[in-house]
Image: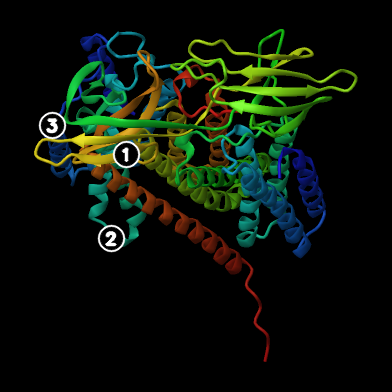
Amino acid sequence: MNWTHFPWIFGTAALCWGLASFLSGKWLIRLAFAGTIAIAAFIAGLWLSLDRPPMRTLGETRLWFGLLLPASGLLIHRFVPWKWPLVVSTGMALLFLGITLAKPETHDRTLMPALQSPWFVPHVVIYMMAYAFLCHTAVTSICYTWISRNNPVKAERALPMVEASLWVGFGLLTLGLLCGAVWAKEAWGHYWTWDPKETWAFLTWGCYLLYFHMQPVWRKKPRSALLFLALASVTVFLCWFAVNAMPSAAQSVHTYTG
Amino acid sequence: MSIAAAVTLAGLALDLVFEGRGMPAPAYPDSAASACFFVAITTGIYLSVRKHPIAAVLGGRHLAITTLIVLLIWGGFLGYFPQVDTQRAGPIYQRVLRAPPFVFALLLLVANLWWGVLHRLGKRLDASALFLINHLGVAITVGAGLFGTGDLIRMDVWVGKDDLVWYGNHKGETRELPFAIHLHTFEVEFYPPELRLIDSKTGAYTEMAGEPPIALEPGSAGQIGDSHVEVLDWSADAPWSSPDDAVPAARIRISTPGSDPTEGWISSGSKLAPPMFIPLGERVLAMSEPRPKRYISEMTIVREGFEPMEASVEVNKPLRIAEWWLYQKGYSPNPSGPGYLSQIEAVRDPWLPLVYAGFVMMAAGSLLGFARAGQILRNRQNQQVSANPVPSQAP
């Protein structure tokens, strides 16, 4: 499996997810699952052909996001059987996979020695899962901030579901942070050096931590809670994509390689 | 807001007094004494006011929120602006790590976490497991990291083949190690280099986007646009290499429809030899810089009172010697001869067990957070059932 096969995989996933958006019940789940399996198969094939985990470049992490976002959507659907969160998650996954399709990369087999660690895969996968759940939180928050503009009761009803997703995402974010710290100790001699990537990971974690500490405010103003969560998701994208473009990037060991 | 603001202002004032040189980081025994003093004073403050409403403020969410906001602001500076050595005074947003306001904010965070824990300990523990584990975990982690700063030693040790080295560089200062490193061999294994395309006008790499890269191994081949490229030969030691300077090179054949096949050498060059390219239209074929796959130092560790110990150090496989850890940090071509110098990092961090204890508690807290998500969903389902009860069937 290599990059030349990806357009076909993308097309298959897009077809499955596109059809699913018009259906409901078992066929919604089956088609969403089928599209997710297609992406999983591509990642597995790429892993075997490259002989390394395909999570070294920004494009490769987008692949994982495109897998884990609908996977988390299916998990959420198991507990909250609404159609639209699953449809939105597959739609968002198509967006990220589409960006990857538009910006093909050259996947070489090299993996620097520091990345040849048993912590590499858990750290990245846990982080991508966290981002997936936080993306759900953000999208639901944005939607209900808009929907509830004339009816705040809707915001109050949506908040428990949003917070359930947030607890899972934040828990995964913490575990990903800790995995990274232990790996940094094994590979580079210290668990935390305030590398720009680590600092932005702390800022992301800190923003959501701030949310949890403002619960009494959110009980009275659920719409404000949703707006806060929508804005907090900006830190996720800054940490994931924008660190490489910041003035501090030159001092980071976490820059993605192409 | 007033406590966090006062702490920040005090930090800024102290920064002026220190003239930008940064907070001192005491080493043992001062570090341990400082930590004990901090715990004692914060505990003493809480116990003296525990029946006063201010106790709830000290361990409460308002102070937590304002402290977090202050830390997020300083973190924003830290994450955006490049940081400079605190030996030289510069704008405070470029020397955040040792700046008094940032250090004070971290101390306030630890204090608030500890006061929060003390305040909750009087309540039912099982109702506060999530709170206690998370807050204590973060307090221990941040506190141990902060007070242990002065005790953390990270020394760069450069050692060449057959050298015996017992010193290293720690923050610009040469220090002795309690052991010596005698390097027998340093081996580097490289990935096969790959073919690269360079734009002949701009000099920028033009990646063959979407295509698998062509590895420069005998027999490998691929397509670049209309041209078929074959690798005829590859050597890490081209015929024109000298005994002290190995030049990697590959012989390539390019077949383009409508023209005769051409052959030539490409090379990434070496210390003495320049790189070599083959033109291909508006681009040139080049060889990628060799990328290390693995590097390992085989050594003997010599310590007073112990038998010499044979050992090896590799990336992600550090070596432990008493309270020290040796890490394979990197390597560099030997400027005074063939081969490489191995860069070893010797690290000593006596506070690490405490930090890891904090990590374990934070991880446990995360798992409890998953359980909280489940509880929220169950509560929601119960509310929905209560609001829409299923009517009982008449007998």
Mark 1 vs 3, N-terminal side = 3
Whole-number angstrom distance, CA of label 1 to CA of label 3: 30 Å
Q: Residue at x 74, y 28 (%)?
A: B230
Q: Residue at x 39, y 19 (%)?
A: B338
1 and 3 marks in contact (CB < 8 Å) = no
Kind of element beneath mark 3: loop
Residue A145 percent across, percent down from the top left:
63, 40
Q: Nearer the viewer, residue A174 or B40?
A: A174
Which residue does the numbered mark 3 point to in the structure image?
B28
Q: Nearer the viewer, residue B199 or A251?
A: B199
Residue B170 percent across, percent down from the top left:
24, 21
Q: Nearer the viewer, residue A109 or A224?
A: A109
Mark 1 vs 2, N-terminal side = 2
Q: Is residue B259 left or right of residue B213?
A: right
Q: Is residue A214 left or right of residue A22?
A: left
Q: Let me know if residue A152 appears in the view.
A: no
3 and 2 marks in contact (CB < 8 Å) = no
Which residue does the numbered mark 1 point to in the structure image?
B312
Residue farthest right in this picture: B258
Kind of element beneath mark 2: loop
